[in-house]
Image: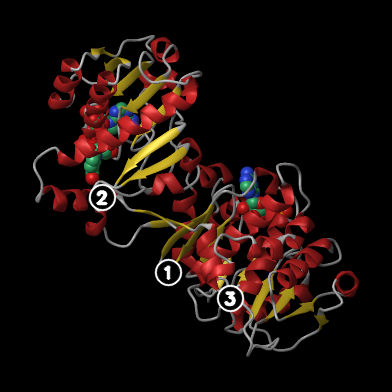
Amino acid sequence: MIAAHSVADVRAAERAVMALLPPGTLMHRAAAALDVECARVLREATGGVSGRRAVVLAGSGDNGGDALLAAARLARRGVAVTALTTSEHVHPEGLAAARAAGVRTRPWQAGDEDVCAAADLVLDGIAGIGGRGGLRPVHEGLSALDGPVVVAVDLPSGLDADTGAVTGELMAADVTVTFGTAKPAHLLAPAAARCGRLVVVDIGTTDHLPAPAVERVELADVAARWRRAAPGDDKYSRGVVGVVAGGPDYTGAAVLAVEAAVRAGAGMVRYLGPQHPAELVRQRRPEVVVGEGRVQAWVLGPGVSPDDPEQQDRIRRALASGEPAVVDAGALAGLPAALGPHHVLTPHAGELARLLGAERRAVEADPLTHARRVHESTGATVLLKGSVTTVVGERGVLTAAAAPTWLSTAGAGDVLAGVLGAALAARPDEDPAQVAADAAVLHGWAATLASAGGPLAALDVADAVPAALTSLPGWAGTGG
Ligand SMILES: NC(=O)C1=CN([C@@H]2O[C@H](COP(=O)(O)OP(=O)(O)OC[C@H]3O[C@@H](n4cnc5c(N)ncnc54)[C@H](OP(=O)(O)O)[C@@H]3O)[C@@H](O)[C@H]2O)[C@@H](O)CC1
Ligand SMILES: Nc1ncnc2c1ncn2[C@@H]1O[C@H](COP(=O)(O)OP(=O)(O)O)[C@@H](O)[C@H]1O
Ligand SMILES: [K+]
C-alpha cells in the first residue's frame, strides 16, 4: 500500500517535527534525497554524473529552496548546474549555497525552454504543495519539453496536491521525489500519469502523520486479504453470487460477468435473466444455477437495458434486499433513493457524468471530486473506473493503478463486476470500499497476464483471474 496525506496533514507533521530539530533540517534531508536521485537518473540516462549538464528551476517557496540546495550538492559532484529563478524572491540560504558551490544563477527569461531542452536533466522546483493552476503562462513552454530527464521536486509544479486535478499545462516528470509521504495527486488520475516514477523519501515526519487521505492498493495487499477456501468451507459459506445481467441485446455481458465471478472463487453463481442469455451462460458455465434463491452478493446491470422491465424489477428487489451489490451499467440508470455503503456503484467517467448531470470531460479532469460527490449524495460506495480506478467509501479513498492500457476494451467492465461480486460475497464483514479496490487491483493484474504487452479480450481477463491470484506476491506465504 502507498499512503498519501493531505497538504494540511503534511504541514502539521512538518511543524511538529521542526519544533524538535534545528531550522532547515527537513529541507536539507529533502535536498540530500534529491541529489542522490538526480545522480542516479543522470547515470542511467547518460552513463555518468560529473560533467553532465543540469538546469534547476527554483520558485518562490520552500520547493525552490529544496531545488537550490540540491543544485549545490549536484555542483559539488561536478555537474554543470544552471539555476533559473522563477521569482524575485527565492530561498536565501538555498541561493547562497548554490552560488557558493559554483552554480550559475540568474532569473528565468523568455526562451529559456531552449536552455532546459539542451540539458541532460531538469529539476523542477517551481512550486510544490503550495502550487496550483498549472504552469504560469511564462513557463507554459516547458509542457512541451523534449529531451532531458525531468525530476520533479515533491510534485510537478502547478499540480493541486490534494485532488490530482489538472487545470493547466504541466511539465510531466520522469521521476518525482516526494518527502515524508506521497500526496493525493501522486496516486489520483489524471495527475498520477504526469508524475513518472514515484520516490517517497523518509524525512522523519512519519510518526506525526494521521491516517492517510488516499491509499493505493498494491498486489501484496490483495494477496494478504483475498479470502481463501478453508477446510471447513462449503459452497454457501464461500459466497453465492447472484448475477442480474444481459438481455435480448447484450447477451455477452451476462457470460462475462458470470465467468468472472466463477473464476474469482465464488462458491456458487446464480444467474437471473431472459432465456437467450441464460442459455449462453449455461453453455459456457454448466456450474451456474439459473433461477432465484439465496445469495450473499449481487452483480446488477451489465448488459441490462434501462427499458427491460423484468430485469429492472429484479435489480430493484436486489437493491432493497440488504445484501451487498455491484451496481453497474444498466443498474445505474434508475438508482433508488435508499442506498448504502454496501452498494458499490461501478461507473466509468461517462456514466458518472450522467449521474451528476456533468460533462464527461469535467469528470476526467478531476475524478476524485466527482466520485466523492456521488458518494456523498447517494451514500453508496463509488468505484470510478479508468486508467486509475478511484474508490470512495465511508472510510476514505483508495486507488488501483497499473492496469495495462489494453484493458480499455469492450466487456472489461463486466468482468470487473463479476470479480467484485465474488469478492463481496466472500468478504461480507469487510469495508466494501476495501473489497472493491482489491477486486480492481486483481482485475488489472489479470489483464496484465492476459495481455502480455499486447491486445486482450475481456473473456481472457476473466480466465486469467486464477493465475493472477496464485501469482500475487506473497500469495503462497499468506495461506494460498
Ligand atoms: N511540508 C514539509 O514537510 C516539507 C516541505 N518541503 C518543501 O516545501 C514545499 C512547500 O513549500 P511552500 O509552502 O513554500 O510552497 P511552494 O509549493 O514551494 O511554493 C508556493 C509558492 O509558489 C508560487 N506558486 C503557486 N502556484 C504556482 C504555479 N502554478 N507556478 C508558479 N508558481 C506558483 C506561489 O507564490 P507566488 O508566485 O504567488 O508569489 C506560492 O506561494 C514542498 O512542496 C516541499 O518541496 C521540504 O523542504 C521538506 C519538508
Ligand atoms: N486507459 C486505461 N488503462 C487501464 N485500464 C483502463 C483504461 N481505461 C479503462 N480501463 C479499465 O477497463 C475497464 C473498462 O470498463 P468499462 O468502461 O465498464 O467497459 P465495458 O462497459 O465495455 O465493460 C475498467 O476496469 C477500467 O478501469
Ligand atoms: K515542483
Q: Position of residue 181 (x, y in %)?
A: 33, 49
Residue on which disc 1 sits: 394
Task: Determine the quadrant in which ligand 1 lies.
Answer: top left
The quadrant of the image that shows the N terminus is: bottom left
**Vertical relation: 127 (above or below) 295:** above
Lateral position of residue 280 relative to residue 339, left or right = right
Q: Earlier in the sequence, mark 2 or mark 3?
A: 2
Q: Position of residue 277 (x, y in %)?
A: 86, 69
Query: Which is more foreground, mark 1 or mark 3?
Result: 3
Lateral position of residue 295 relative to residue 363, left or right = right
Instruction: Tell me which amino acid carries mark 1.
Output: Glu
Please report the residue visible at 68 percent of the width from the left and 88 percent of the height from the top.
236
Tell me, for residue 10, which label it has, or none: 2
Instruction: Tell me which amino acid carries mark 2.
Output: Val
The quadrant of the image that shows the C terminus is: bottom right
Query: Which is more foreground, mark 2 or mark 1?
Result: 2
Lateral position of residue 332 relative to residue 307, left or right = left
Cβ of mark 2 under 8 Å from ligand 1: the answer is yes
Callout 1 secondary element: loop
Lateral position of residue 99 relative to residue 138, left or right = left
**Vertical relation: 227 (above or below) 248:** below
Residue on which disc 3 sits: 227
Please report the residue visible at 27 percent of the width from the left and 18 percent of the height from the top.
75
Tell me, for residue 9, which label it has, or none: none
